[in-house]
Amino acid sequence: MSESRITRRKVVTGAAVTAVGAPLLAACGSGDGDTGTGSSGDTGSGGGGPLVATSEVPVGGGVIVADRNLVATQPTEGTFKVFSAICTHSSCPVTKVAGGTIDCPCHGSRFSIEDGSVTQGPATSGLEEVAFEVTDGEIVPS
């Protein structure tokens, strides 16, 4: 087992830190509107070991891995997706997955857990999808 494996405790801790720090992070955006990209640079794809165990990703929901700037979702049982966790509107990190959407706290944008598309603006482009593999019950960016 790799030392960089994300445990449930790390995910919960990362989500709590992200949620608490969200108002401060809101000021980090460019404020220039939609960037049109799903990334602010490194999305954590490739290398770095497993992202999360498939058993930790709820059906109809997802898990934000804040320290990798990624979100893993499971729209339907056994179907997984991985997206950048950086909102395409002002580059804020998303902080919540609920009700079939990935939510950004900065300006209220929401994205589909199925394909990362915008379900509520102001973002006009979807989250960047990240290539991955499921290996030994773990989601591994490729």
Image (cartoon, grey):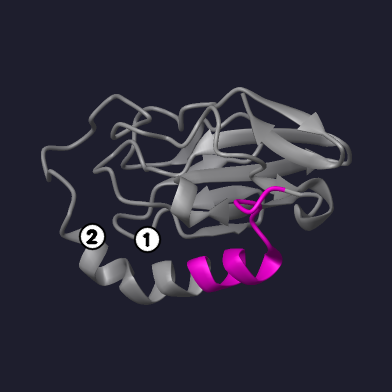
Q: Quadrant of the C terminus?
A: top right
**Is residue 11 on the magenta stretch?**
yes
Of 142 and 89, nearer the camera is: 142
Mark seen at residue 55: none
Q: Residues within 10 Å of mark 1 (few under 14, many from 20)?
A: some
List the residue tagged with mark 1.
Answer: 105
Across and down, in percent, residue 12 comes to 59, 70
**Is residue 87 highlighted in magenta?**
no
Q: Which residues are magenta?
A: 2-14
Q: Position of residue 115 (x, y in %)?
A: 61, 29
Distance between mark 2 and mark 1 Cα atoms: 8 Å
Q: Is residue 48 left or right of residue 53?
A: left
Instruction: Tell me which residue sits at (55%, 27%) in the image.
Output: 130
Residue at the spot x=67%, y=42% of the render?
A: 50
Position of residue 70 relative to residue 45, above or below, is below
Q: Which residue is mark 2?
A: 26
Residue type at mark 1 is: Pro
Q: Quick one: 93 or 124, which is closer to the camera?
A: 93
